Image (cartoon, grey):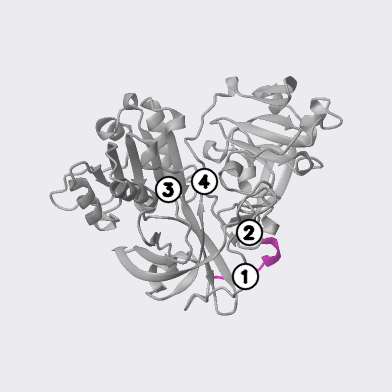
Amino acid sequence: MPETNTTLAGQRRLLWRTAEVRQVIDETPRVRSLVLNVLGWPTHRPGQHVDVRLTAEDGYQAQRSYSIASAPEAPQLTLTVERIDDGEVSPYLATEVRVGDRFEVRGPIGGYFVWTAALGGPLFLIAGGSGIAPLMAMLRHRAAAGSHVPALLLYSSRTFSDIIYREELNRLAALGDGPRVFHTLTRQQPAGWTGAARRIDRDMLAEIGIAATAQPRIFVCGPTSLVEQTTQSLLALGHEATMIKTERFGPTGALR
Amino acid sequence: MQDPPVARGFRGKRPPSGNDRIPPGQHLTSDFPVLSAGPTPTPRPESWSFALQNGGSLLGKWNWREFEGLPQTRLKVDIHCVTTWSKLDTNWQGVSIDTLFEAAGIAQPPQPYVMFHCDGGYTTNVPVADLIDGKAMIATRYEGEPLLPEHGGPARLLIPHLYFWKSAKWVRRLRFMEHDVPGFWESLGYHIYGDPWREQRYAGD
């Protein structure tokens, strides 16, 4: 079978490729990163995602989408998965999987929620919970590409121990031209906490965010409620809708 | 073709029933997840309108009050998102594309394809054949309530037999086209047509 199929329209079909787990990183009590070897991976742009397909012994299959957390420059593909307790795929990926296990991935997918150093900045990233994953791909790419584009990450987590990539973010921020990283903890804060202690709101965006006059490229990823609230606040602060790109997960907050 | 690798220890949650209503690669959800590429637009009802366009000519245009006054259609349908969730038995109300064409005096669609244009700049392409004979509507109500803005309110397209990205939110204009031209996601690697039963998720599927 050829490596890629080409349709009449000249579009290459995305093939399922076997991924082998090379490393498992416990990020938080609910979140793990899986570092994968994917034979023939065609590279990606920061912000894109993959479909993961799991096959059971009897042939039953389940697939879901996950953001890519690694930079294109990294030799291996990293996915960061939060365990959804009543989920089907995430409990397996975030609890069961160990080094040497194999499953399939297909991608990269999505070409809108994407930032590369060539696009320039300033870069204004806003994350809620595991919504950090595609934004981390952007920050890792920024560092790997030696980009000097001003960058700010505003990151909302429930508690201190829920902060994903905490130490790596500290290291990136400590670099000479590293990104500014600002945390807010919405549920519980440790003693001596110097970050914010509430949900992201308009005042917080006005106070620590990049001003609309600087025309930052804005990427917001997190639960629907966070994305809705944040993007409406950004519009109210004068940012252009076309400069704001979003990825949402989770249901609407409204009862139906 | 080689068998896919078995994920050691994976059992999965098999759907208990209604299996024949779930397309390949999909799973059931009871939520209604929200997926949009940018901020949710919040148009005022007084400035909202819906238009039918062919080339440079306007075939029909309704303001919110006029649109709400058009004969209403109700649909109970299953919906399928390309991100792999499916939701069964969703109830929608709105104006069918057949009704719109009739109200605009269009006996025969002038072109075989359509581009839908939305607030926020989103577009999606659909063959006319997939819109008529009760197959699609401009929905304004979901489960008896006005559509929430994050779900596409005040009005979204509903084409339940195609992946749900085709059911464009915040829809404002239908433009006839001679040829099938890719819309927003269709230009970014997603399938030009998007049939969930043929699992047409991405270009070339």
- Regarding mark 2 in the picture, which secondary structure is present there? loop
Residue B177, given in percent of the width and then of the height, sits at 73, 32
Mark 2: give few (<14), some (14-19) or many (20+) Cα within 10 Å.
Answer: some
For the residues bearing labels 4 and 2, Cβ distance under 8 angstroms? no
| Chain part drawn in magenta | B13-22
**Where is A50 relative to A145, above or below?**
below
Report which residue position mark 1 lands on: B16
Q: Which residue is mark 2?
A: A5
What is the C-alpha distance between the residues marked 2 and 1?
36 Å
Q: Could you tell whether A28 is left or right of B6 in the image?
A: left
Earlier-in-chain disc, 1 versus 4:
1
Q: Are marks 3 and 4 in contact (CB under 8 Å)?
A: no
Q: Nearer the viewer, mark 1 or mark 4?
A: 4
Amino acid type for the residue under numbered disc 4:
Val
Circle 4 residue: B34
Q: Which residue is mark 3?
A: A47
Which element is circle 1 on?
loop
Furthest-front residue in this view = A2
* Mark 3 → mark 1, Cα distance in angstroms: 35 Å
Residue at screen point 41% across, 67% down: A37
Do marks 3 and 4 share a subunit?
no
* Cα gap from disc 4 to disc 2, whole angstroms: 32 Å
- Whether A24 is among the magenta residues is no
